[in-house]
Amino acid sequence: MISRLWIAAALLCSPVCGGGELRFVLHHEPKTLNPLAAAEDAAETIRYLTGGVLIRLNRLTQELEPELAQSWKVSGDNKAITFQLRAGLVFSDGTQFTPVDVAFTVSQMLDPALHSPVADTFTVAGVAPKVSVDGPQTVTLTFGAPVAGKERLFDQLAILSARSPLKERASLGPFVLDSYKPGVELLLKRNPHYWKRDVAGKQLPYLDTIRIPIQANREIELNRFRAGELDLMNNIDPESYDRLAKAMPGVVHDSGPSTDVEFLWFNLAPSSPVPQYKKDWFQSAAFRHGISAAINREDLCRVVYRGHARPALGPFSLANKFWFNAKLTSQTFDPARGLKLLESAGFQKKGDVLVDRAGHPVEFSVITNTGNKARERMAALIQQDLQAIGIKLNIVTLDVPSLLERLTKSSDYEACLFGLTNVAADPNELMNVLLSSGRQHAWNPSQKTPATAWEAEMDSLLRAQASAGSRAKRKELFDRVQELMRREEPYLFLVNRNSLSAISPKVQGARPAAFYPQTFWNIERLSVK
């Protein structure tokens, strides 16, 4: 039924669709324009719009579809994957696409100097994959150990040209970067050599250009949308959603729980400038459990998200139909229990103040990003919750580049309230976040050896599921990973917000999905009247 509807829509659209400019905002500057280094949502957006991939995850069906590779085959021992590439494809500047480009891309992605966030997902048992060019359209990647579900890794790997003088600016995706005015906007134009055509034979994409202003202020974004100056609002906040639903009910879409998750974590990095006595707090599972029990997640969903969210249980939400662990139950708001857990770790209340064994008042700061009203409000509610058990929480808001600098370079922070824009549909795509050696293992990144016994156990389970022979066995092992994360709480998972979006009636072909990028995952088939 889905394929018939898709074909019918394409047939209906192709004679008239074409041209037009799509407009939506980024809330901060992309930290990089190198698609292999994209690690935050602004850079991810540009990568998705411009990067060509071997295999694409359909965000609506959650099934894999062939892209630059017309077919692929996994070896019997589950260690290798061989791609048969489409013939005759060229990059946006006319440079021919060959298997050499795939080999070059993998070598660039694995270069330690690049710090690619996807490199960890391709490294198995500490061994990087080997690439062999087996023919004019054939390339094979051989991993250091069996890896199940490896096909899904390639949805996030944009292929670069080994020969183009434009380097990473040469695109195999539907759009190319035409201009970039830092702090102002990016302009993308259609790739004149894009390989896809619709069923009527019309070359995709339909759009001529995509104009992307950089605008941190979401109120301005909302006003521009209402004035018709913007065509899409992706991941809009609940207040804006409700206001639009009242004023323009036909433009809003609530696609249910998104794959994104909001969480809080403590800095456990030994090299951080955090005072040692606070490091001792943060290292204590009882401390983390006590804080977690004192946070009212239902209030966060009700007050901050106006009911357009639900308490988060782990790294995957209900939107991920297969990998979500349905055995996990919501964290119960119980400040009395939270206080008892803290007391079991040597903390005690003196009047209205909680102190540790040495008499230090329990006070710490949490950083989050400026301009994100939902996170700022969550921080304020958590501040109130913790004050009720004698803890002083200081809230520090930073622009995204400054926040990322503290998280990835200086490690100068105590706790962070942030979120994962989860493009992953498979646990193997989260290896860089969950493995102790991962660069995005937020609470203590890039560990040479696991700092704790439970992280070693989690590493073992993650690697075991990655090489398990059956999907059912992988599911069993990853369920245990999620249960271990609940037991230790390195992340205090808070909420899964709903996927809320607004789409102008002028936009044709949009089919909002729960998976990122919700409104424009099928960008090559969108058009503007």
Image: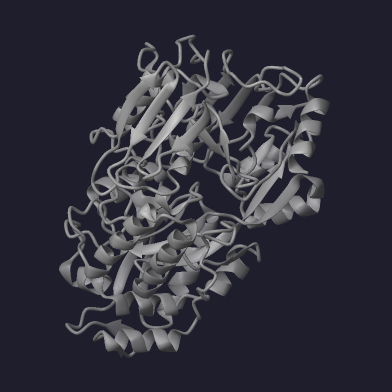
Name the residue located 16 percent from the left edge and 68 percent from the top edge. Answer: 276
Note whether 286 is above or below 528 in the view shown.
below
Q: Quadrant of the C terminus?
A: top right
Can residue 108 be seen in the rendering of this structure?
Answer: no
Percent coordinates x, y for residue 54 in the rendering: 49, 30
Of residues 467 and 30, the one drawn nearer to the viewer in this rendering? 467
Percent coordinates x, y for residue 71 in the rendering: 52, 30
Note whether 458 is above or below 138 in the view shown.
below
Name the residue located 58 percent from the left edge and 64 percent from the top edge. Answer: 304
Percent coordinates x, y for residue 366 in the rendering: 36, 62
Of residues 29 and 69, the one drawn nearer to the viewer in this rendering? 69
Image check: 337 left or right of 509?
Answer: left
Note whether 201 is above or below 428 in the view shown.
above
Name the residue located 42 percent from the left edge and 49 percent from the top edge. Answer: 148
Note whether 438 is above or below 58 in the view shown.
below
Percent coordinates x, y for residue 195 in the rendering: 59, 18
Q: Quadrant of the N terminus?
A: top right
Image check: 337 left or right of 70?
Answer: left
| Residue farthest along the front direction in this orientation | 76
